[in-house]
Image (cartoon, grey):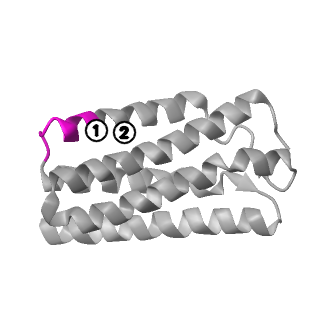
């Protein structure tokens, strides 16, 4: 089990990334009121994901979960977090179209799937399986919901 401060920092960074995606989707809900319900639901899920990832530290320290060392680099997660923050600023500036929001969300959700973000934990415990299943299922569902909305809007 990895329990170094670097791993804890990375877990906090990953939680911040999920929370930032939630804030981005909340910004979309405010700026695109005709799609507010859609974006607010995604935002709520992302906030829950952030809380799940944020709670991993305590579970790791208790020995019930393990973090996959080297799975993600601080630099890669920081770069993605910076991108999400830039998108939040863009949305808040009012320079936002529904297609841009959908395309950005589709890119983000696809990147999370391709990086297998939801496999951030390992182990045979029930807790590990639940976190992995929840993050994975929600992310795949988000991608499909966003893809369908994007296809409809095209």
Residue 93 is a magenta residue: yes
Kindly state the secondary structure of the residue where label 1 is placed.
Answer: helix
Q: Residue at x 47, y 63 (%)?
A: 139
Q: Is residue 119 visible?
A: yes
Give whichever of 140, 45 is nearer the camera.
45
Q: Is residue 6 left or right of residue 115?
A: right
Give whichever of 33, 80 is nearer the camera.
33
Q: Residue at x 53, y 70 (%)?
A: 137
Q: Is residue 149 above or below residue 53?
A: below
Label 2 Cα neighbours within 10 Å, binned few <14 / some 14-19 / many ≥20: many
Residue 91 is a magenta residue: yes
Query: What is the number of the mark on residue 41?
Result: none
Give whichever of 150, 94 is nearer the camera.
94
- Which region of the structure is painted magenta? 88-96
Q: Residue at x 53, y 56 (%)?
A: 49
User: Disc 2 vs disc 1: Cβ atoms closer than 8 Å?
Assistant: yes
The residue identified by callout 1 is 87
Q: Is residue 116 visible?
A: no
In terms of image quadrants, where is residue 34? bottom left
Q: Residue at x 87, y 51 (%)?
A: 63
Residue 12 screen position, x and y as percent = 61, 37
Residue 73 screen position, x and y as percent = 61, 33
| C-alpha span from label 2 to label 1 | 5 Å
The residue identified by callout 2 is 84
Residue 43 screen position, x and y as percent = 38, 57
Residue 94 screen position, x and y as percent = 12, 40
């Amino acid at each position: 089990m990895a329990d170094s401060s670097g791993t804890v920092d990375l877990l906090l960074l990953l939680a911040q990334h999920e929370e930032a995606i939630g804030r981005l989707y909340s910004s979309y809900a405010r700026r695109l009121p005709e799609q507010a319900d859609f974006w607010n639901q995604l935002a709520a899920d992302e906030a829950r994901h952030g809380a799940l990832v944020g709670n991993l530290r305590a579970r790791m320290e208790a020995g019930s979960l393990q973090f996959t060392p080297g799975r993600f680099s601080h630099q890669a997660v920081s770069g993605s977090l910076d991108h999400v923050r830039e998108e939040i600023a863009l949305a808040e500036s009012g320079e936002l179209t529904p297609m841009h929001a959908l395309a950005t969300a589709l890119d983000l959700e696809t990147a999370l799937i391709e990086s297998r973000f939801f496999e951030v934990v390992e182990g045979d415990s029930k807790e590990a399986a639940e976190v992995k299943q929840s993050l994975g299922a929600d992310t795949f569902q988000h991608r499909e919901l966003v893809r369908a909305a994007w296809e409809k809007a095209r």
